[in-house]
Amino acid sequence: MSIKIAVTGAAGRMGKTLIEAVSLNASAELGAAIERPGSSFIGADAGELAGIGTNGITVVDDINAVINDFDVLIDFTAPAATVANAQACVEAGKKIVIGTTGCTEQELTTIHRATEQTAICMASNFSTGVNVCFKLLNEAAKILGDDYDVEIVEAHHRHKVDSPSGTALSMGEAVAEGLGRNLKDVAIYGREGQVGARPDKEIGFATVRGGDVVGDHTVMFLADGERVEITHKASSRMSFGRGAVRAAVWLAGQPAGLFSMQDVLGL
Ligand code: NAD
């Protein structure tokens, strides 16, 4: 039996990729496609929008109008839209895969509260490769310890609105956990002017924005005489799309609760 999936933000960069990714997964089928009210894509055929040919699913502007047409919603939109969609899904008992980044603490609290009633899989990055990197970074931090300075550099396309990327923050958390530090206490986001010598336990973030970069991340462990770098480079959004659809199929069989891509992959 295939899992029926709804994609919201259907006309976005990730939305179109997700519609195609659903069509490539034998265990999934598209049940609905949603865009924001006022979008010029309302009424369009979702398959045509994604460039994969007509699929008979019309893009609508109200999740409640299609709430009975899917089992799992995949939401890569914007924080306020994601919170509203999560509430609609909770009321209808639908499960949700959330890829949206840049949520505030308050928005995260609302989403986490929803996991008392439904299953939600949320990840800053749904690529398998990046999730392997999270695991490697945690191990590397445990082995290298406090003798190595940690710096995280990320690059994304010019349209990205949040900084640093959610993936860079998750990488920082994986390292901080391995070092027994709280990321909030040791993170520094950019340096300018007479900032003085680097404090020992700092974890630094630097951001590059421009062009069409899909997503590059490098974590450096720097010591006197050597440097270890763990790098991931995404060359296609399909790496996130395939992972998110895999997560949706997996989530369909889970009880209420909060899950991550690490859970989906059994890491
Ligand atoms: P985008 O701007 O291209 O697409 C977002 C889409 O959401 C737009 O088409 C917009 O009209 C739509 N939208 C906004 N409000 C809506 C609403 N209320 N209902 C329905 N649709 C609505 O952005 P993008 O590059 O596709 O990225 C979207 C999000 O996904 C960002 O937060 C980005 O950081 C995140 N992202 C996450 C991963 C991951 O693996 N977790 C990977 C890539 C991007």
Image (cartoon, rainbow, N blue to C red):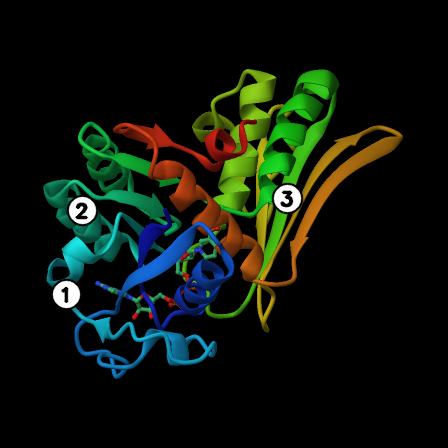
Ligand 1's quadrant is: bottom left
Q: Is residue 193 found left or right of 29 in the rendered image?
A: right
Name the residue that disc number 2 marks.
Answer: 89
Instruction: Decide which of tag 1 and tag 3 comes sooner along the chain.
Output: 1
Q: Provide the secondary structure element on which disc 1 rests.
A: loop
Measured in 3D between alpha carbons, the distance from the residue under mark 2 to the one under mark 3, in whole angstroms, is 29 Å
**Disc on res. 70:** none
In the depicted view, which residue is nearer to us: 134 or 31? 31
Identify which amino acid the numbered label 2 is placed on: Cys
Q: Residues within 10 Å of mark 1 (few under 14, many from 20)?
A: some
Question: Which is more N-terminal, label 1 or label 2?
Answer: 1
Q: Residue furthest right?
A: 225
Q: Tag 3, which secondary structure?
A: helix
Name the quadrant containing residue 7.
bottom left
Give the residue pinned by disc 3: 129
Vertical position of residue 265 compared to residue 156: above or below: above
Alpha carbons under labels 1 and 3: distance apart: 34 Å
Looking at the image, which is closer to me, 116 or 209?
A: 116
Q: Which residue is mark 1?
A: 62
Name which residue type carries label 1. Asp
Q: Residue furthest front?
A: 1
Q: Are marks 2 and 3 in contact (CB under 8 Å)?
A: no
Q: Position of residue 129 (x, y in %)?
A: 64, 44
Residue at the spot 52% in from the left edge and 45% down from the top edge: 167
Q: Nearer the N terminus, badge 2 or badge 3?
A: 2
